[in-house]
Image (cartoon, rainbow, N blue to C red):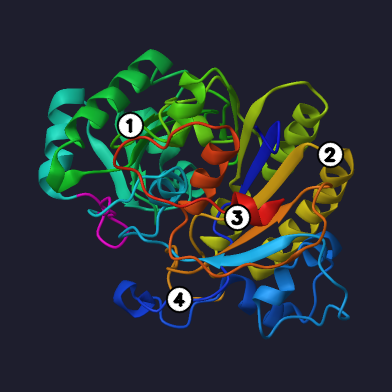
Amino acid sequence: MEEYKRIFLIVLDSFGIGAMPDAPEFGDAGADTFGHILEKKGSLCIPNLERLGLLRLHAGGQADGGKPPVGCYARLGEASNGKDTMTGHWEMMGIRTEKPFRTFTETGFPPELVAELERQCGKKVIGNKSASGTEIIEELGEEEIRTGAMIVYTSADSVLQICGNEETFDLANLYRCCEIARKITLEEKWRVGRVIARPYVGKKRGEFRRTANRRDYALKPDGPTVLNALKDAGFDVIGIGKISDIFCGEGITRFLHSESSVHGMEQTIRVCEETFHGLCFVNLVDFDALWGHRRNVDGYAAELEKFDRNLGTLMRKLRRDDLLILTADHGNDPTYSGTDHTREYVPFLAYSKRMEKGGRLRNEDTFAVTGATIAENFGVRMPEDTIGTSLLKSLI
């Protein structure tokens, strides 16, 4: 018998809570996304996260007045070999990744890859560096329009992005080039997690703006996940934000793309007002894309406070047979050097109006406890070769 009819799983993309023991191997010794934001800001107005027990996971955090938490909370370590978006989300749903995706943050893409991309696409590559998408369009948009080249860039994540002006490049041609890039980067030596089409409009600097015609070409998960098991069993699996992109549509029955993290929470609140049976899986990317990678402490802190306000609304609207889980997929300490993700523990915060009491759970060494908990709740078997043990009995 199901304990909960609906589960809301919300990923605060990059919200780490302290370096894992192996962080030095990833160049991330001492990283602490949440802790360092607290340290820099002095305090944060996040009463709902406090109620769920977040500050109790951070030894140096604000005092919570000794009030008992209304939720259950724990630290989760990552079992996979990586610290990127796809690795973290896939592990939540049971897949342990041993071979990390390739990143090209420091050097850009190798000459052989660029040459092959130019040959098959019939266009010269410009850019080829790690950059902000809006900034590289400002820098190179005029050159692309004038010469017929294509802007290729990456980030701290495992991604190859191609910008194209909708009027001079043509959307269909942009998508064609991205499909070519996806095939090329399936090779193990160039294994990239996602290829993204980044269309824009405008004719000169100061006028360029990206459009909503973005398209993601992700790798499919290495095998079936908990999402597949839920969908195959007839449950709703609603993806909000970039969830459908991360799983290449696998196991998703309905998806909603978000314009921002605030919009993603507004969509989640609207879905909460609907009737469905299964999982609502949400990714809130602005913490990572807008603030973590750009090393903007103030922006990250403000985003947390905006999230907390919407979190309060969602918690009030939850039904008695709903379960809410908040977690993250990796860290991205905005006080750290460079612009890369950071290898950190992530929070596991769970709440239901049915819970008799909140409290601390034991720490776990894999994000996969999340998917295993969801699978047990809905009575579906974990797919073969997946990992994770359920925490459901502790969340009743």
Q: Earlier in the sequence, mark 3 or mark 4?
A: 3
Q: Is residue 381 left or right of residue 391?
A: left
What residue sits 55% from the left and 28% below the top?
202
Magenta stretch, residue numbers: 100-109
Q: Position of residue 196 (x, y in %)?
A: 40, 34
Marks 1 and 2 sit apart, C-alpha to C-alpha, by 35 Å
- Judged by depth in the image, the label closer to the viewer, 1 or 2, is 2
Q: Earlier in the sequence, mark 3 or mark 1?
A: 1
Q: Earlier in the sequence, mark 1 or mark 4?
A: 1
Residue bearing mark 1: 220
**Pointer 2 local density, CA inside 10 Å: few below 14, some 14–19, many at least 20:** few
Residue bearing mark 3: 327
Marks 2 and 3 sit apart, C-alpha to C-alpha, by 21 Å
Q: Position of residue 123 (x, y in %)?
A: 23, 28
- What is the secondary structure assignment of the residue under circle 3? strand
Q: Amino acid at mark 1?
A: Lys
Q: Earlier in the sequence, mark 4 or mark 2?
A: 2
Q: Main secondary structure of the magenta part?
A: loop
- Judged by depth in the image, the label closer to the viewer, 4 or 2, is 2
Q: Position of residue 244 (x, y in %)?
A: 50, 30
Residue bearing mark 2: 320
Contact flag, marks 2 and 3 (Cβ < 8 Å): no
Q: Amino acid at mark 2?
A: Arg
Q: Is residue 12 left or right of residue 381?
A: right
What residue sits 21% from the left and 24% below the top?
121
- Judged by depth in the image, the label closer to the viewer, 1 or 4, is 1
Q: Amino acid at mark 4?
A: Ser
Marks 3 and 1 sit apart, C-alpha to C-alpha, by 22 Å
Marks 1 and 4 sit apart, C-alpha to C-alpha, by 32 Å
Give the residue at the far bottom of this rendering: 60
* Residue 215 in view, yes or no: no
Marking on residue 337: 4
